[in-house]
Image (cartoon, helix red, strand yellow):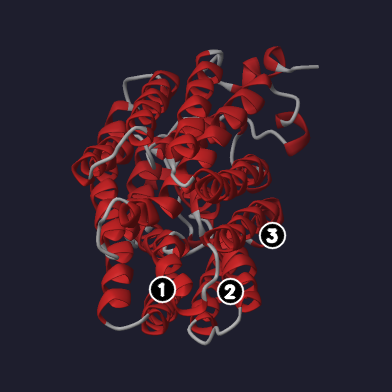
Amino acid sequence: MNRPFLGPRVVFVSFLTLIGAFGLNLTAGQFFSPLHGIYGWSLTTLSLAVSLNMLTWGIFQPVMGRLIDRFGPKPVIAGSAALMGIAFLLSSTITQIWQFFVYYGILTAVGFAGCGSMANSVLVSRWYVRNRAVMLARSSMGMNVGQLVLLPLAGMLIAYTNFRIAFLVLGFMMLLIIVPAFLLLTKNTPQSIGQAPDGDPTSTFTPPRSAPLSEALQSRVFWLASLAFVTCGYSLYMVTIHLPKYAVDLGGALDLGGRLLGIAAAASAVSMWITGQLSKTHRKKILLIWLYAIRAMALFFLAVSAHLWQLYVVAVLYGISSMPIIPLVTGMISERFGANALGSILGSTWLLHQIFAAIGVFVGGYLRSATGNYHLSFLTSAVALIMGALLTAALREPGNMAHLRADRTC
């Protein structure tokens, strides 16, 4: 008897893994107020630790990509998820600022590099070719659910217990749920268990030729898509990390930031599903331009917000245009360059993304300290996103690898 196609189960476990990975890594902003209140650590210093996380994550993306290309996604993702869980358990013991830098800034980031979007995109891309865009969108909804569930949970744990309990609960969730599920329920490739991509061994569809990293680095498509993507990183993490503090600045409670990010995650989940369906019939380039433009509008509105009700409007607009950008960009790159070296190629794209994410987090904290408010910080994000929309508009989106050499920049 032929065993059922494992692809849907792989997509579900990838979805579950992204819940944990993004939920944990994006909770840092929830801890700013208690750490400042207890230890007096400044917002600039705490922002620098998060910038270190973003930069470390980016640096390790190509490293993890190469490990995935060599050993497969399963051992890399499982080991990285375990490292994130351990790092959060260690974070529950912090009493000095260097510990926050090491546990969250470095260890959590290294783990996230190996079990975040890039790694799971490679895994899903190995199991699906024809249905890749839709399945990437479905698995990527874990990023939204992680924010929807774990960010408010972290806020409530901090508000009603303390930050140490919050770190412990989140760490154990990763170690006791995510890691075992990934080890027990996934495989590296469909071929390893005698199956075919999309579950159809009789398919006559021929996937595009896979390009090596060196060839992708000479492509105009790679650079335009990647440089537009860095504006996503700059704005995404500035808002995610600093919105909780901004909510407190405007008179909100400690857990309001988590609720706002939860609303954004819910809006993003709906948008993720819709864009996944639209990607079947509409060009990814057009969808991306709209998403960059909507997020720019949200950040302009956030920059001039002065009342708590306005933050709820921003949360919805920001959510609609946040995470759906990621599967569209990774889907565009995977369709263009194939799956064989996808870990290395996406790792390079994510490195650029995270360099600017680190800059965005630090700039947000620095300008808040220098000016006394977040207005200028959020305005820089809005301007960057307009540039992202323009870069995306310059993209050409041919349907197969035969056009690759025509897109080279040299």
Q: Is residue 353 visible?
A: yes
Q: Amino acid at mark 2?
A: Phe
Viewer-side residue, 148 vs 207: 148
Question: In the visual, does 354 lie left or right of 368?
Answer: right
Q: Earlier in the sequence, mark 3 or mark 1?
A: 1
Residue at the limit of the structure toward the left, as seen here: 309
Of all residues shown, which one is farthest toward the right?
Answer: 410
Which of the labelled discs sits on residue 34, or is there none? 1
Measured from the top left, where is residue 229 in percent x and y?
A: 54, 33
Please state the total of marks drawn on the protein image. Answer: 3
Report the front residue among 154 and 374. Answer: 374
Quarter the N terminus occupies: bottom left
What's the mark number on residue 100?
A: 2
Residue closer to the observer: 192 or 321: 321
Disc 2, disc 3: CB below 8 Å?
Answer: no
Cα separation between marks 3 and 1: 37 Å
How busy is the neighbourhood of tag 3: few (under 14 within 10 Å), some, or many (20 plus)?
A: some
- Dot 3: what SS? helix
Residue 217 drawn at (x, y percent): 74, 31
Residue at point 28%, 38% (across, down):
314
Q: Which residue is mark 3?
A: 67
In this rendering, the label closer to the viewer, 2 or 3: 2
| Picture residue at 52% right of the left edge, 25% below the top | 388
Residue 112 occupies quadrant: bottom right
Residue type beneath disc 1: Pro
* Dot placed on the residue nearer the N-terminal end, 2 or 1: 1
**Image-based side of 360 in relation to 175, left or right:** right
